[in-house]
Amino acid sequence: MNDNDPQSGFTPGQFRERFRIPGGMRGAPGVYLCGNSLGAQPRAAVDAVDSELERWATLGVAGHFDGPTAWTEYHELLSTPLARLCGARDIEVVATGTLTANLHQMLISFYRPKGTRRRILVEKGSFPSDRYAVASQVHLHGLDPEHDVVELAPRRDGLLHEEDIEDYLEHYGDQVALVLWPGVQYATGQVFDTARICRAARKAGAAVGLDLAHAVGNVPLNLHEEGPDFAVWCSYKYLNAGPGAIAGLFVHERHARFDGPRLAGWWGQDVHTRFQMRPRFRPEAGAAGWQLSTLPILATAPLLASLQMFEDAGGMPALRHASLALSGYLAHLVHEELGEEIEIITPLEPHRRGCQLSMRLHAGEAAGRRLLERLQAHGVTCDWRGPDIIRAAPAPLYNTREDVERFIELTGRLLAADRG
């Protein structure tokens, strides 16, 4: 794919000057390939936070109600750009909470075991926080995670296959209460056909939820049409909102007037009666009804600033084109120049990969850790996931072909030095 194709509308790294990239050696620009873990800082994030600090200083409590960024309505400023990123409707998304807290809220509402239908189906090797959350929710229902959390294992190729999910649900779907699946597997970088997974879950009569932590802002999403019951995500990876930033959730419009169980808090109360302090909870329609506490404005302002860049870039179609060009270029150079020593474990078909490529050194774990440490010492930032995976994720908003080339050149040089 030609990343300079004018039809793409966006060139990899086109917005690089809008970010502060962690530095390299002796003040030189760094190569930051870690947007899969923590996105680089948008320069506009500083202005966004400073603006709210100034409003706090000058308006005090009146800042909740005054001005275009009144804090009581602040989450509404994010709904439309988030909905566009997620392929959703405004009523279906809200910026709120943190990833695992939001997941717990969704499980309270949508994991409703009854009779023999009580299993939660997840992938083996899921992100630990997801595994902890589902196990604890099974415990809350008096059930045993050893029996009622079912983990589908990868095949010998190390990857999970949608047909295996379909096969399991075909045979045991009447025992499954909920399917929880990632949009992108955090360790391998594999992108899943979430539409296919949602269809299989609904056919089996199970609820379905998606963890989009590694998918939102990375790959195109179409949540409204695909129809999961819920989805959750964080905002500090590809959405570049900073460490501990506000997270988000999706609840399909068919649940807009949800009458099942949920955890309730005053920020989920109908906005027209929220400040009347009534004792009875009447939730906002849609995803906003799952809000609990007052929005943490200083943890939300950077997300608002970052989402504007996604809009300016032309949205996910343009960024996806640039992303595939960049990750494809990285894969090509790894194969051509490092293939005897490094294996890419991420599927390379365009529809099965996002920004992240996960790699493994043939020389083993110790060699991989040593390489990662030496790359970091030379101003090149990737990350590690045990037992032996190096993850590199060129993000199209701020990474360039030159970043990829620098990573390849330095990696080759360091590996050559090890060979003596």
Image (tube, rainbow, N blue to C red):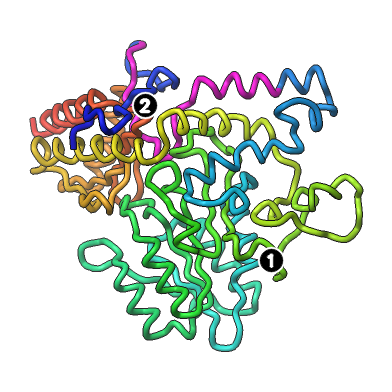
Q: Is residue 112 above or below residue 420?
A: below
* Residue identifier under label 1: 258
Q: Residue at x 75, y 31 (%)?
A: 70
Residue 39 within the magenta-colored segment of the rendering: yes
For residue 273, which numbered disc appears in the image? none
Whether residue 417 sits left or right of residue 296 in the image: it is: left
Q: Residue at x 42, y 37 (%)?
A: 315
Q: Position of residue 121 (x, y in %)?
A: 45, 72
Q: Amino acid at mark 2?
A: Tyr
Whether residue 71 sits left or right of residue 238 in the image: it is: right
What range of the chain is rendered magenta? 27-52
Q: Quadrant of the C terminus?
A: top left
> In terms of sequence position, does the residue under pointer 1 or pointer 2 come before the other?
1
- Quarter of the view holding residue 390: top left
Whether residue 326 sits left or right of residue 207 in the image: it is: left
Q: Residue at x 33, y 79 (%)?
A: 167
Residue 223 within the magenta-colored segment of the rendering: no
Q: Amino acid at mark 1?
A: Phe
Kind of element beneath mark 1: loop
- Quarter of the view holding residue 320: top left
Q: Position of residue 410 (x, y in %)?
A: 19, 26
Kind of element beneath mark 2: loop
* Residue identifier under label 2: 398
